[in-house]
Image (spheres, rainbow, N blue to C red):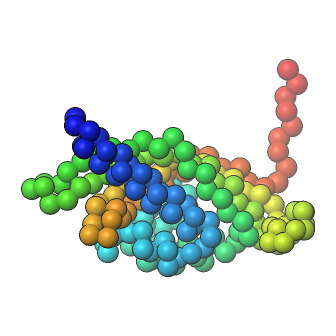
Amino acid sequence: MTQRVELATVMDRLAVDEVVTAYAVAVDDGDWAAYLTLFTADGRADYRSAGGIEGGAGQVAGWLSENLALFSMRQHLIVNRRVRFGTLEHDTGDTAQVQADYVNPMRFAGGEGGDGGEGAATGPDFVCGGRYSFAFLRTGEGWRLRTVVVEERWRVLPGPRPAAVPG
């Protein structure tokens, strides 16, 4: 591989990584206009494993907006990103696949607790984790999401925890 190709690959990896980060920030901040700009015109998302829906990015943004309003605080932590690049048939464009693990602590709106600071959430915590599969397409506007698939693997609900077994 030449230095030019290696530099292009690094630049593409950084650009794809920026979209993943922008995705997390848009969801956490409830910025659905920004969320939509991250997708291709036919982009889709699948949240079924987390109790959600699968559909076009606009439909899913509406569902997320409604359901995430239950939470006054959201904070995606997306880690262990594995990036693979490919070429579409007939060399018409570039693709990328990213698998990344996530932990997503959230806090329900209302209730008791919290530190009372500005913007502090006061409800109980909810935490989930799993893996994202992102599929990208290079467009004239840069890298965009074609699909996002959420594979929720675990969650911790508010409430009493089982007592530890003495060992």
* Residue at far left of view: 90
* Residue at far front of view: 3
Q: Residue 46 location in percent, x, y?
A: 44, 62
Residue visible at 33% across and 58% down? 136
Q: In front here: 40 or 18?
A: 18
Whether residue 146 is visible here, answered yes or no, is no
Q: Residue 24 location in percent, x, y?
A: 55, 61
Residue 25 is drawn in which quadrant?
bottom right
Q: Residue 64 location in percent, x, y?
A: 56, 72
Whether residue 18 is visible here, answered yes or no, is yes
Q: Is residue 95 above or below residue 45?
A: above
Q: In front here: 53 or 26?
A: 26
Residue visible at 42% across and 68% down? 38
- Describe residue 18's horizontal placement relative to residue 76 as left or right: left
Q: Residue 103 location in percent, x, y?
A: 62, 49
Q: In front here: 5 or 72?
A: 5
